[in-house]
Amino acid sequence: MIPRLEDLLDRHAERTPDAPAVDGGARTATFAEVARRSSAIAAALQREDLPAESVVALDLPAGPDLVAAMVGVLRAGLAFLPLNREAPATRRHDLLRRAAARVVIDTGLLEEIDPDASHRRVDHPPGRLAYVIFTSGSTGEPKGVMVERGSLDAMLAAHEPMGLRPGDRYLVFAPPHFDGFLVDTFVPLAAGACAVMLPRHDIMPGPDLAATLTARAITFATLPPAALALLPRRPYPALRGILTAGDRIPAALAAEWSARVEAFHNSYGPTEATVAATFGTYEPGMPQNHVGAPLPGVRVHIVDDRGEPVADGRPGEILIGGPGVARGYLDDPPLTAARFVPDPFGAEPGARLYRSGDLGSWRPDGTIAFHGRCDDELKVRGVRIHPAEIETVLLGTGELREAAVVAAGEGADVRLVAFAVPHDEAAADGGTADRLRRAIGDALPRAYLPQEIRFADALPIASTGKVDRIELARQAALRDRLPAREDGASLEARIADAWTRVLENPVDPGTPRSFFELGGQSLTAVKVVGLLAEEFGVTMRYIDFFRNATVAGLAAWIKDRSENV
């Protein structure tokens, strides 16, 4: 029988009660403290006498309290829904409504809980709902993925080959509303190791992340390839293992890091398969789209458009079976039936396969090569984004007849480009683009904000009668020639020039808008920090940039610290 997360936590709390379990930066909680706190939270929830599988939303920052709340919800036999605390209020309220959350645990509610209370132990069946995670939806609405207890526990057991042990310090890179947070947090806890979760500005790819790896003596981390590529090439004495996930990793980058750490792993898996379905260790000569072999208990089939298995080396859709397959989508039986289908290859009654929509192929050694998406879902720096969500917001402004969003670039340089067809193209101007950006920012997380909005009189149409997204992607890759900076330019012009080079769109030195309002993202901000540090000879951290993210703000900050202005 696969042990449950809370049982593993209690075992470590009994054996090594004072060992660190969660390092939250400002506060570190031991295994004994997390066990007691989660028991008190479970007791409070049990007193509410909520129906089984009720959803409890978690509105807490990453740290010991969030982890204790997650475990407490599981102890009580309920399901947790981690909220994105940076999302617009309208989106948060919509997700709470759709999930029918009975309770929202925030900092205020935690203060009211009796810390000495203990929960009533109940054996929860493997089919009990454990959590709901919302992911981008192809219809323009996010879809809630329902994952059961048996799937969560099987995922933890399947990660034992990572070789984590007590004393390891695992960096939590994913934010709480991503399913990757569960791997980064629960896998180390199950092994008796410490999950290290810090403010976002301390783990921004580049110098900040590098400083954290050293200062916090991180031994393991899950990092997307785009973040790994931005790490300075210097020793990290404590770091012994890297798990990369979320995107294909360039072969040169994989070869470099596999030589620098004891274990360099890669994995693949959608939210609907409980985070991970395959796992592998990089070896020299492996292609960049290698994502390992199926995890223990996981069944993977690669089929053609008729549902027949393909030969080795031939691409087809990846179908995933086994204990990690989610229950389905919240309140969406048609989509559940379309994506979670009966398993025609197995003998187990009622077994299902998840149709991932991903393309892959078998390699001769039994590992899988990943080839991308079957549909138009985009992956931008590890974040799954359906263009339809952004397009729905754009069309909802009433200013456009048509809209389409595509991705251009690769790896850390990937960017979103929105093509907009206004009702009156002659009337479309910078003010129109500003209003469209604000609409997206008010409705969707920051990762969804296009770096560029291009106006057109029509969208190209493919032979199928649908929008030709391949042609749009080609057009998005054609970048306008950027103006060269004049000699003797002002400080503001030099800053705007750095923004222009990174955003690949001309930036007016007098703009009052922030870097992020112009389409900048965290990874592109890291690039600007590097350019400004080199240009002006200053030591700048991401948090400095974030707090002064306008041209004028950065100019004032640099004037106080640099003689090279």
Image: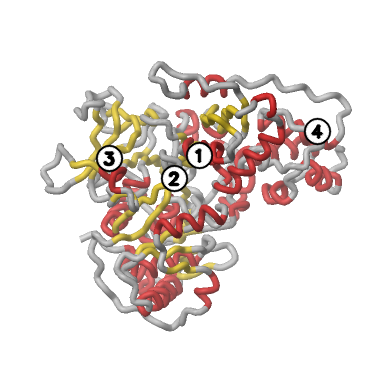
Above/below status of 471 relative to 207: above
| 117 w.r.t. 453: above or below | below
Judged from this view, the residue extending furthest toward the top is: 463
Q: CA distance from mark 4 to mark 1?
A: 37 Å
Q: What residue sits right under mark 4 in the picture?
A: 494
Q: Amino acid at mark 4?
A: Arg
**Mark 4 vs 2: CB contact within 8 A:** no
Disc 1 target residue:
392
Crowd around label 2: few <14 · some 14–19 · many ≥20 (10 Å): some
Question: Element under label 1?
Answer: helix
Residue type, numbered disc 2: Glu
Element type at mark 3: helix
The C terminus lies in which quarter of the figure?
Answer: top right
Q: Residue 160 vs residue 402: left or right?
A: left
Residues at circles 3 and 2 in contact by the CB criterion of under 8 Å: no
Q: Which residue is mark 2?
A: 141
Rendered image: mark on residue 338: 3
- The quarter holding residue 502 reads top right
Estimate how packed mark 1 is, as few (under 14), some (14 to 19) or many (20 or more) residues with alpha carbons within 10 Å.
Answer: some
Q: Quadrant of the N terminus?
A: bottom left
The answer to whether residue 294 is seen in the rendering is no
Q: Position of residue 37 (x, y in %)?
A: 44, 74
- Other residues around mark 4 within 10 Å, as few (<14) / some (14–19) / many (≥20): many
Depth check: 202 or 220 in front?
Answer: 202
Residue 307 x, y percent position in the rendering: 21, 30
Give SS at disc 4: helix
Mark 4 or 3, nearer chain start: 3
**Mark 1 belongs to which amino acid?**
Thr
Horizontal and vertical percent position of residue 73? 38, 68
Image: 324 above or below 472:
below
